[in-house]
Amino acid sequence: MIFKRVLQTALAMGLAVGTSTLHHGSVNALEPKGECYVLGVGDSWQGPTSANLSQCAALAGEQSSAAESGTGVSRWQDVEIQAKPDGSYAAYQAGQLLTTGFWDVEKLVDDAVDDIDAFWRSEFEAREWAYESPGRVQAYSTRIRTACGRSVPDNAFYCRVSHSIYYDTGLMRDQFNDIGDFAPIVIVAHEWGHAIQAQRGIFRQVRSTFRLEQQADCFAGAYVASLKANGALSDEDAEEALDLIRALPRSRTHGTPRQRVAAYQKGFDGGATACLG
């Protein structure tokens, strides 16, 4: 995942160890708005546009396919951003790698999917349980038909009929910009929790939607804890996970933000075993 790649790069360069040295993707004091300039056709700078670093990276990314060099370039304050058509970017300050990430949220999710899948496969194998990866993790930007009916805007959900996860790219982009690049990953980890429930027959055992949603939050916490155990979770990403949950509205089916944080923390502290107990 992105966290591991940044960690390895930081170690190789002798920089401070962490998943990133700058909190990115969040519109707050840690990543304020600034002037963003984008290198356009004919090597002319376009702008300025008011943006945070992640948004400035996205503007560079939109230019990457048309760029002769294959790399979109932008400048945010004193940071140079290089964005690739594959959805990734790297930011440099005074020639030093500052942070990396994804300007394309679908690429970010795709990268996270492999890691979440590997985590749960390992958990199942440790318990000698058969594991089946979700059939698909599919993005949508307009309403689509699924085996569980038509998709809903601004939503992410697990479909038991096809054992698949679906998410609205608009929702993920909003969370990416408002909370940070770790927020979409926590959303996917929660939906993956429902896939785990389906495989373990928990849907048949538990009829309470509230209890199912609390357990899915717990499973998400267990996954994030595995990143910390591997040295692949930054303090910023850990805080983004909690920021996301705290920002969610109170819901009869999902609970209050405080209840959801408690469920997530249960998994973070005790791992998948705590969630299954």
Image: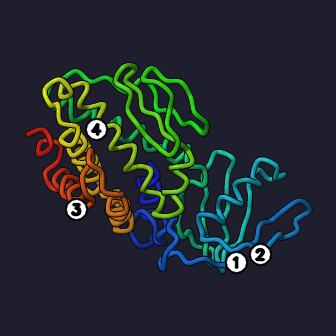
Of residues 178 and 249, the one drawn nearer to the viewer in this rendering? 249
Of residues 190 and 63, the one drawn nearer to the viewer in this rendering? 190
Question: How far is disc 4 from disc 2 in space, using C-alphas?
Answer: 43 Å
Quick check: 53 above or below 101? below
* Residue at 50%, 67% in the rendered image: 26
Place of residue 141 in the rendered image (x, y in percent of width and height, measured from the top left): 60, 39
What secondary structure is marked by label 4?
helix
Quick check: 202 above or below 52? above
Place of residue 44 in the rendered image (x, y in percent of width and height, measured from the top left): 88, 68
Q: Which residue is mark 1?
A: 35
User: For mark 2, does the 10 Å Cα neighbourhood hold few (<14), some (14 to 19), or many (20 or more) residues?
Assistant: few
106 to the left or right of 149: right
The quadrant of the picture occupied by the C terminus is top left
The type of residue carrying mark 3 is Arg
What secondary structure is marked by label 1?
strand
Residue that sits furthest to the left in the current view = 277
Q: Earlier in the sequence, mark 4 or mark 1?
A: 1
The type of residue carrying mark 4 is Gly
In the rendered structure, find residue 193 and report the number of the disc placed on it: 4
* Residue at 56%, 53% in the rendered image: 102
Question: How far is disc 3 from disc 1 in space, using C-alphas?
Answer: 37 Å
In the rendered structure, find residue 258 and report the number of the disc placed on it: 3
Q: Which residue is mark 2?
A: 48
User: For mark 4, does the 10 Å Cα neighbourhood hold few (<14), some (14 to 19), or many (20 or more) residues?
Assistant: many
The type of residue carrying mark 2 is Pro
Q: Earlier in the sequence, mark 4 or mark 2?
A: 2
